[in-house]
Amino acid sequence: MSLAIALHVLSAVIWVGGMFFAYMAMRPAVVEVVEASQRGVLWSRTLERFFRWVWLSVVLLLVTGYWMIFSVFGGMAGAGWHIHAMQTLGLVMMLLYFHVYFAPFRRLKQAVADKDPQAGGVQVGKIRRLVGINLVLGLIVVAIGSGGRYL
């Protein structure tokens, strides 16, 4: 159980913390420092590296989460409301991530390959909005996961 919880929490920290850093710190700095024509390239390369970690986090969150539900709580009926809420919001987050990865991120990489900064900028804007939504959901999930049993 302790290994599952540690991997589960670390996976959430990597994913949600990465989104927080990208949205709240890197994005404003990029706008201030990097020329508009180079922003798509920077975001493409940065997200490519970050998304490798998100894929690993998604797998670990699912494996450890369902392992804990079925081996510790005895199944869905034994899990508290906070576990169900965390699971539901986490699955929504994963679906949003899959959309980001397979749609606007893929189009961003194509725009970078085509050397089309305007098209890349459009995709970065779409990614930013979806990551903003996922960040809010992720912060809610962290709050529920860490304090839900005490509410």
Image: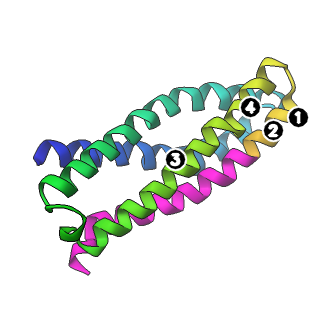
Name the kind of residue labelled 2 in the image. Answer: Gly
* Residues under numbered marks 1 and 2 in contact, where contact means CB atoms less than 8 Å apart: yes
Please tell me the numbered disc located at residue 108: 4
Residue at image coords 78%, 18%: 113
Give me the C-alpha separation between circle 4 and circle 2.
8 Å
Q: Secondary structure at mark 3?
A: helix
Viewer-nearest of discs 1 and 4: 4
For disc 3, the neighbor class at 10 Å (few under 14, some 14 to 19, many from 20) is many
Residue 19 is situated, as x and y percent measured from the top left of the image, at: 52, 47
Residue at image coords 14%, 61%: 74
Residue at image coords 59%, 32%: 47
Give me the C-alpha separation between circle 2 and circle 3.
18 Å
* Residues under numbered marks 3 and 4 in contact, where contact means CB atoms less than 8 Å apart: no
Name the kind of residue labelled 3 in the image. Answer: Met
Labels 4 and 2: the sequence-earlier one: 4
* Residues under numbered marks 1 and 3 in contact, where contact means CB atoms less than 8 Å apart: no
Task: Give the labeled residue for mark 1.
Answer: 118
Q: Secondary structure at mark 2?
A: helix
Q: Is residue 8 magenta?
A: no
The vertical placement of 90 against 30, above or below, is below
Task: Give the labeled residue for mark 2.
Answer: 121
Task: Give the labeled residue for mark 3.
Answer: 19
Give me the C-alpha separation between circle 1 and circle 2.
5 Å
Give me the C-alpha separation between circle 1 and circle 3.
24 Å
Residue 24 is situated, as x and y percent measured from the top left of the image, at: 57, 51
